[in-house]
Image (cartoon, rainbow, N blue to C red):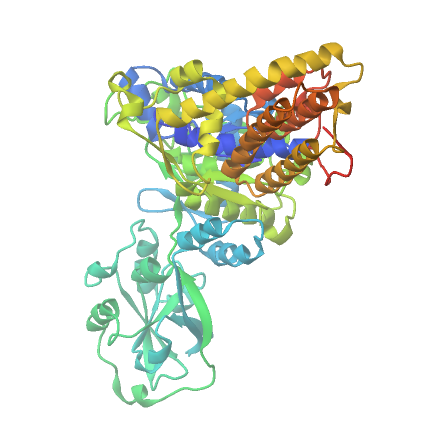
Amino acid sequence: MFADCPIGPRDGDIGVLRGFTIADTCARFLRASGRAVLFSVAFDSFGPAVEMEARRSGTAPREWVGRRCEQMRSRFEALGYSCDWERALIASDSECYRWTQWLFLALLERDLIYRGETQWLMRIGRYVAESERGLEALTGWDAAAIDSQRAVTDRIDGVEIRASTFGAGELTVFTPHAEAVAQATFVAVSPAHPEIELWASDPEVAKQVAAMRGETRHPDGNGAERAPLAVTGALATVPGVAGIIPIVVTPLVDARFGATAVLGIPELDPTDRAIADRLPPPAGAAWKTSSSGSTPRPAARYRMHDVAVSRPGAWGAPVPLIDCPACGSVRVPLEDLPVRLPDDLLIAGEEDIPLATRADFHDCACPGCGGPARRETDTIDPRLDRMWMWMALCVPAERRSSAMFSDPEQARWLPVEQAVSPVDGAACMFERRLLAGIMQDLGQLPSLPNREPFSRALLHETIRVDDAAIGESQGDGLDIDGLLTQAGGDAVRLAMLCGAAPGRAFRWSEEPVRRCRRFLQTLHAFAEPRLREWAQVSERPPEQASIDASQELRKRLALWCVVANEKVTMQLERLETHRAAHNAMLLLTRIQDFESRVSEHGELGAPDREAIVAALLLLLRLSAPLTPHIAEELWSAAGNAVPVSEAGWPTLSRPARSIAA
């Protein structure tokens, strides 16, 4: 099980808790169904949100994070989340960010990280298409989650054709205008194309292309007349195009189609027209030749850009590189990781970048020559933390120092059975999938079916909070701790589950909490005396309570129990938590109705009382994933020695004469 847990100043709000409530409900259901479940939490504790709050409060970021994590854990426990706290981790702990630095260096060594104009960037172009194609195998993902992953890639459909170049072999070119291939007048290649050197062999062109690859900005079509453009002098023949056309290099390709090569068709595309206006006129008779052979085939390209993995902020894992006057950029040796943040780090003003002003941090000796050198003072963007930290939950805490990415427990727990993430985290989910593919190629993850790390995924919507629910005294956020104290964890938890389907947003107010609290009070008032009486007078253990269906009303109650069992089971399997909660609550109404109808004909007999107990015990087992506190309390009141969380998931059949709890 995996769910996101950022801990910025507004994180941990009711919307974030909704995702964890859904995830914990699923984890409890799977455990009860006999599955081995690992459900823990990785606190996303780096980044500008924490810097801002530390600056505002005048506290050290480390101190603020420590208090925030304790507050979050207290909320989680009040809500009954069944987290394995021994496996929990915090991004800003040095033993955790040591592996962020290790991963940075591993990707850098394989040219998957490169230096841009102002930041370090992660090359993702070669993996985007693979990750998008992998969506077809994600049969356990709901349609909305799949669509969100496709949207992230910003896919463009079209055709591709194999063109020939003079002295540089074939070049596959793309166009979204399949019907207008014949109108192409040039080929534009991205400076990030994996074979760019073949068409940029001229030293002057190579220099221009190198400058383009250092750009972190991706100019759009509106800046086509000013965007970098290198005329390579190389020529191509394209099947269907009457002539030889020039090959140019420009980052405009990246902005529109990704790291690829495209046909320029000025008559249809304003950006292509702006590029064509900057090209020299064609030279002589050579332009009158034609080519044929390859036919266009359906293809797609992706506008998703390389990912920034560094930032100039102070609160993040330090970039593990050293600038040496003699050796240049030198990697920190793996045995010297982690490069630690100062324990007394403070962030004073808006423009304060403490690492750049701390000689005790940035002054060091070069690992290569031993001479004086300077550490990089940028930090790794928390985006990279979020890409990998979910993997760390698979590894027992005591083994993380030596084998974070090669522990045998990874093979046991991967792929993740169920991921739960906010709908605005679609890009983050895509990047996690993408990094999992890279890590498998690096031999740092076990081979996963279809190379996918998440078997199932749910992207949930947020909860909107009315001003009336916040109150003037609370400023800009709902008082979660006050709400939990006043209403209780089960009532808040049930209100989050009942509000709407996970894929739909809903508006938070006091009314759903009051309604859920009333239900729980009614459940306790009805069930507690009946279960306690059974525990005192029955000579049989509670699990032997059953419904004798030989009488019509008891048979109807037995059928209601079977229907509730079937519906709640199916709905929890589908993570339709709102419907599961509704049907569990409805079963209490059915049980009360049974008692009322029987009482109309006289006093309850022993079989009737036993039937009520059996139905209530079933209700508690069905409710345990939804409202664990009250389910456990009432289950114990019935005299059960084994906790309801360990009682297993009920499976009932249609009644013949009796049905057991």
Q: Is residue 448 left or right of residue 91?
A: right
Q: Residue at x 20, y 59 (%)?
A: 223
Work out which quarter of the rendered image holds the C terminus and state it.
Answer: top right
Against 578, residue 94 (above or below) is above
| Visible residue check, residue 317 | no
User: Can residue 562 be seen from the camera position used here?
Assistant: yes
Along the viewing direction, whichever of 266 and 442 lies nearer the viewer? 266
Image point (75%, 27%), residue name: 546
Based on the displayed image, in which of its 4 quarters is residue 72 positioned?
Answer: top left
Residue 203 or 101: which is nearer the viewer? 101
Image quarter where the N terminus lies is top right
- Image coordinates of residue 229 in percent, x first then y, are 26, 63
The residue furthest front is 601
**Residue 340 image position (x, y, % from top left):** 45, 24
* Image height of 468 relative to 202, above or below: above
Give 334 or 140, whichever is nearer the viewer: 140
Q: On the rendered structure, is 190 left or right of 453?
A: left
| 489 displayed left or right of 640 | left
The count of marks equals 0
Q: Residue at x 58, y 38 (%)?
A: 572
User: Residue 6 is drawn in which quadrant?
Assistant: top left
Residue at the farthest right position: 539
Q: Is residue 359 left or right of residue 299?
A: left
Q: Where residue 335 sits: x, y (%)?
A: 56, 29
